[in-house]
Image (cartoon, grey):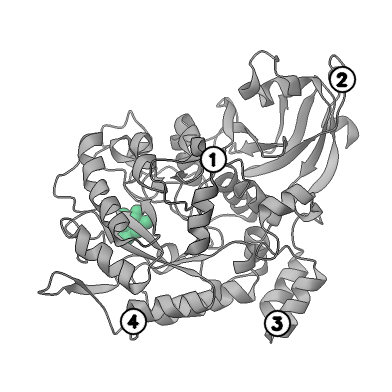
């Protein structure tokens, strides 16, 4: 607690957001049970998962919040306070919190700004004070606050703001540091007011385990859809990316657009699709909350979510999301009529640039972007200084080196003892953000955060790459000096 207050005090005034609780200066990371387990929750599940987060080295990569979603109570007592389900949580919520804190985790819980939660458990509307008191007294560090059964109290930004602000004020009044995560699915322009009272806000209906399949239940991602009465569920990775693109710049340290919890490892996407999903969530500065069952995680999944070079993009101290600089809809489409490519580019703290070639077309494609396009945020028409320099290009997935090998990931999963696991992680020289926070690793130039060097782009040149169908190439561009007006048109391809 003391540390957090110190961090808040040390923040430059200009960066302090209205919520001003000092939390989530970089997007929060952790695990949430909903995507895999829905209402099948228990103390056992949370604590088995937290143990695996430690064992697999994920806690040391930054996954520090263990978040319990819906379905944990048996209602409200006559005194007005919520009663936890002691069949599911025999030691109470404070028992879970204590255990998680002992292991070095932070504990998240869930409620709804409605009469009921979405799974029809008791909600917190009009009981904000009591419920915030309960959360604080149990030792809760994070509240995900949903939007179901709001009793009609929505329809304008102000009505929604007021409803969510009641809980913000109640949490503040407890004096406990509690990360506040809004789950109003993008309703009532939450991106325009969420940052005033909360650390993150969901921007869409619920994600589902599909890369690009459109679904009518994700109604509101298509503004022209007359059936858009609620943001819904079954939103694909592509639908969510397209929804947030126009206001991706609303995210800032302490207050983030939430693209929803990760689907990596649930089985509905290919490995390349999951890599693209994970990298986009990192570069767009969404919270990174794993949603898979860690007890049955495979090596492929582990070697996606434990890539420190990708996580370092999410946790970059500059805290600016990449922005979409181009979108091409005239590419081969799938049976649903979906197919597009996108280029995203964003500034990082040390002057590096993250670039993502995102291929949601139905074919492998050559993609490219000029330096003038990639640095448009620093000056349109090629006027940015960055266009006049050479850039070293690093691939953040790489072939080997940037990502844990499947054999090592399997060895981590199969290890029979803590000692055996630590020795695999040590042998693989795996990154440990508990020992060295990302900000320090970036400052030190720790190679494990910078991916694999694959070429250069000369001043005035283009970055080009072949991108597989339903995949993303993720690059970090590092300044390599060079002079204004140096050679034109030399590309990464020339060197490959
Ligand atoms: C939805 C929410 C999901 C999950 C679910 C629980 O509204 O978007 O992430 O929390 O409710 O019922």
Asked whether disc 2 touches disc 4, contact meaning CB atoms under 8 Å apart, the reply is no
Q: Which residue is mark 3?
A: 415
Sequence-wise first label, 1 or 4: 1
Sequence-wise first label, 2 or 4: 4
Where disc 1 sits, the SS reads loop
The span from disc 3 to disc 2 (Cα, nearest Å) is 52 Å
Q: Which residue is mark 1?
A: 12
Sequence-wise first label, 3 or 2: 3
Q: Is residue 230 left or right of residue 95?
A: left
Sequence-wise first label, 2 or 1: 1
The span from disc 2 to disc 1 (Cα, nearest Å) is 34 Å
The span from disc 2 to disc 4 (Cα, nearest Å) is 64 Å
State the residue at coordinates (30%, 51%): 168
**Outermost left residue:** 78
- Which disc number belongs to residue 48? none
Please tell me whether mark 1 or mark 3 is closer to you in this view: 1
Please tell me whether mark 1 or mark 4 is closer to you in this view: 1
Q: Which residue is mark 2?
A: 483
Ligand 1 occupies quarter: bottom left
Q: Is residue 139 left or right of residue 478?
A: left
The span from disc 1 to disc 4 (Cα, nearest Å) is 42 Å
The span from disc 1 to disc 3 (Cα, nearest Å) is 45 Å
**Label 1 crowd bin: few (<14), some (14–19), many (20+), radius 10 Å:** few
Vertical placement of residue 393 versus 42, above or below: above
State the residue at coordinates (46%, 80%): 99
State the residue at coordinates (79%, 53%): 446
Sequence-wise first label, 1 or 3: 1
Where disc 4 sits, the SS reads loop
Q: Is residue 391 left or right of residue 274?
A: right
Asked whether disc 1 touches disc 3, contact meaning CB atoms under 8 Å apart, the reply is no
């Amino acid at each position: 607690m003391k540390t957090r207050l110190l961090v808040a005090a040390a923040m430059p005034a200009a960066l302090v957001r209205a919520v001003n609780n000092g939390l989530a200066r970089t997007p929060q990371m952790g695990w949430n049970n909903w995507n895999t387990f829905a209402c099948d929750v228990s103390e056992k599940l949370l604590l088995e998962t937290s143990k695996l987060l430690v064992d697999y080295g994920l806690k040391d990569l930054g996954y520090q919040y263990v978040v319990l979603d819906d379905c944990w109570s048996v209602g409200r007592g006559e005194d007005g306070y919520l009663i936890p389900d002691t069949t599911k949580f025999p030691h109470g919520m404070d028992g879970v919190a204590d255990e998680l804190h002992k292991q070095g985790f932070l504990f998240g819980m869930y409620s709804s700004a409605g009469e009921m939660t979405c799974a029809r458990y008791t909600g917190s509307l009009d009981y904000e004070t009591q419920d915030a008191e309960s959360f604080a007294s149990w030792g809760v560090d994070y509240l995900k606050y949903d939007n179901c059964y709001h009793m009609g109290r929505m329809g304008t930004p102000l009505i929604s703001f007021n409803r969510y602000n009641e809980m913000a004020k109640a949490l503040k009044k407890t004096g406990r540091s509690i990360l506040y995560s809004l789950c109003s699915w993008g309703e009532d322009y939450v991106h325009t007011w969420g940052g005033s009272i909360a650390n993150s806000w969901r921007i869409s209906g619920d994600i589902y385990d599909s890369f690009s399949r459109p679904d009518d239940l994700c109604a509101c991602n298509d503004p022209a859809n007359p059936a858009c009465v609620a943001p819904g569920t079954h939103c694909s990775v592509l639908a969510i990316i397209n929804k947030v693109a126009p206001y991706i710049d609303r995210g800032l340290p302490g207050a983030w657009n939430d693209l929803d919890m990760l689907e990596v490892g649930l089985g509905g996407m290919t490995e390349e699709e999951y890599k693209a999903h994970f990298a986009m969530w990192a570069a767009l500065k969404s919270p990174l909350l794993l949603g898979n069952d860690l007890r049955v995680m495979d090596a492929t999944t582990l070697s996606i979510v434990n890539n420190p070079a990708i996580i370092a993009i999410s946790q970059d101290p500059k805290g600016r999301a990449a922005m979409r600089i181009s979108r091409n809809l005239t590419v081969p489409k799938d049976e649903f009529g979906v197919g597009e490519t996108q280029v995203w580019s964003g500034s990082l703290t040390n002057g590096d640039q993250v670039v993502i070639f995102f291929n949601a077309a139905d074919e492998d494609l050559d993609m490219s972007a000029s330096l003038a396009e990639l640095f448009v945020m620093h000056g349109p028409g090629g006027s940015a200084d960055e266009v006049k320099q050479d850039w070293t290009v690093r691939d953040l997935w790489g072939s080997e080196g940037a990502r844990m090998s499947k054999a090592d990931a399997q060895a981590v999963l199969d290890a029979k003892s803590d000692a055996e696991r630590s020795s695999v992680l040590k042998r693989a020289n795996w990154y440990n953000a508990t020992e060295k926070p990302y900000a320090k690793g970036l400052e030190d130039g720790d190679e494990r955060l910078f991916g694999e060097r694959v070429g250069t782009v000369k001043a005035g040149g283009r970055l080009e790459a072949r991108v597989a169908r339903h995949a993303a190439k993720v690059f970090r561009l590092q300044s390599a000096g060079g002079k204004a007006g140096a050679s034109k048109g030399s590309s990464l391809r020339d060197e490959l």
